[in-house]
Image (spheres, helix red, strand yellow):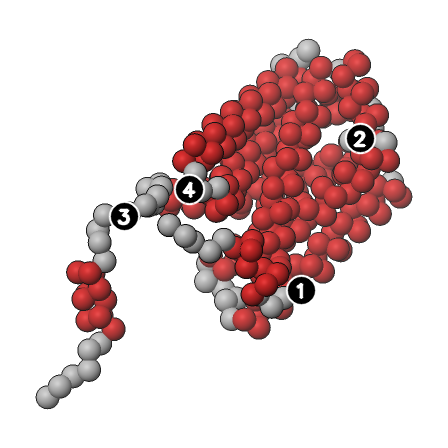
């Protein structure tokens, strides 16, 4: 059965909309967080193992590459969290109108930027 | 006295026409359970993940002993186990639904399914073991 595949639809047939862009971002950040959970579990294991394992893990996370990784992860986390709350509100039947969906979308973006900035300010100042 | 067919009449008519048996890949049959589990874990993860993120912010930058001490007290140990389990369940459902949208062959779907479940079980087991080891004293 020939079905249209959504990724092919986006650049050609769809006009850019905040709602669909954020929907795709929700999936992408979800996948990123799923991959990141491997690192999270690894970190827990390294704390339990201690010694060399923890030292290596800690060095990797504290390296510039690790900081970039953690930075990306924190953005993905806060975005997925904020947009997840938006999704839960939709599931409960609120905010379905196009205008409010767009408005809550911008609120999600603002929340993401704010929470990420606050987090990293805390890290570098504390 | 001709009354225009109401919406419910059309629906009733349509029920006769729409086949009861789903064709092709059909439904997965446990969609609702999964849908609810996805939302339940999402709600649980709001406080749990925020707690974890906030704790780790002040701990991850520090040495191993601080992190180990944190995980050896009961409340953090329990909450970390819960956040990992809820997170992995949530991630597994999410990743599977993405795969279901973009992978259209039975063999590949099955392969992805087995891989994701295996990874999820290994991650969950590893995390729980790690926390338990710290909690019960090394």
**Is B133 above or below relative to B21?**
above
Label 1 with label 4: CB-CB less than 8 Å:
no
Residue B107 coordinates in the image, percent (x, y):
43, 32
SS at mark 3? loop
Whether marks 1 and 4 lie on the same chain: no
Whether marks 4 and 3 lie on the same chain: yes
According to the picture, the residue beneath numbered tag 1 turns out to be A106
Residue A98 coordinates in the image, percent (x, y):
54, 71
Q: Which residue is located at x 62 percent, y 47 percent?
A: A28
Numbered tag placed on residue B34 in the rendering: 4
Q: Mark 1 belongs to which subunit?
A: A
Numbered tag placed on residue B76 in the rendering: none
Label 4 with label 3: CB-CB less than 8 Å:
no
How many discs appear?
4
Query: How busy is the neighbourhood of tag 4: few (under 14 within 10 Å), some, or many (20 plus)?
Result: some
Among numbered discs 4 and 3, the one appearing first in the sequence: 3
Q: Quadrant of residue B120?
A: top right
Residue A2 coordinates in the image, percent (x, y):
41, 52
Q: Quadrant of residue B13?
A: bottom left
Q: Nearer the viewer, residue B42 or A64?
A: A64
Query: Does any portion of residue A96 appear in the rendered image?
Result: yes
Residue B91 coordinates in the image, percent (x, y):
55, 38
Mark 3 to mark 1 CA distance (whole Å): 39 Å
Mark 1 to mark 4 CA distance (whole Å): 29 Å
According to the picture, the residue beneath numbered tag 3 turns out to be B22
According to the picture, the residue beneath numbered tag 2 turns out to be A61
Mark 4 to mark 2 CA distance (whole Å): 34 Å
Name of the residue lying farthest toward the right:
A125
Q: Mark 4 belongs to which subunit?
A: B
Query: How busy is the neighbourhood of tag 1: few (under 14 within 10 Å), some, or many (20 plus)?
Result: some
SS at mark 4? helix
Mark 2 or 3: the one toward you: 3
């Amino acid at each position: 059965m020939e079905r249209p595949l959504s990724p092919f639809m986006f650049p050609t047939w769809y006009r850019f909309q905040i709602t669909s862009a954020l929907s795709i971002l929700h999936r992408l950040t979800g996948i990123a967080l799923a991959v990141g959970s491997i690192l999270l579990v690894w970190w827990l294991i390294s704390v339990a193992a201690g010694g060399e394992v923890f030292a290596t893990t800690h060095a990797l996370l504290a390296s510039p590459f690790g900081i970039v990784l953690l930075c990306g992860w924190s953005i993905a986390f806060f975005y997925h969290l904020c947009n997840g709350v938006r999704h839960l509100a939709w599931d409960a039947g609120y905010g379905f109108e196009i205008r409010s969906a767009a408005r809550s979308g911008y609120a999600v973006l603002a929340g993401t930027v704010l929470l990420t900035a606050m987090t990293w300010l805390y890290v570098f100042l504390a | 006295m001709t009354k225009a067919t109401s919406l419910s009449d059309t629906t009733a008519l349509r029920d006769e026409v729409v086949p009861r048996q789903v064709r092709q890949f059909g439904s997965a049959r446990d969609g609702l359970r999964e849908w609810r589990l996805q939302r339940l874990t999402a709600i649980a993860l709001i406080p749990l993940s925020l707690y974890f993120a906030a704790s780790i912010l002040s701990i991850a930058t520090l040495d191993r002993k601080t992190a180990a001490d944190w995980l050896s007290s009961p409340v953090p140990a329990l909450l970390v186990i819960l956040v990992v389990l809820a997170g992995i369940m949530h991630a597994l459902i999410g990743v599977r639904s993405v795969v279901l949208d973009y992978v259209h062959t039975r063999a590949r779907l099955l392969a992805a399914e087995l891989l994701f479940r295996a990874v999820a079980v290994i991650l969950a087991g590893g995390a729980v073991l790690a926390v338990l080891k710290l909690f019960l004293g090394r």
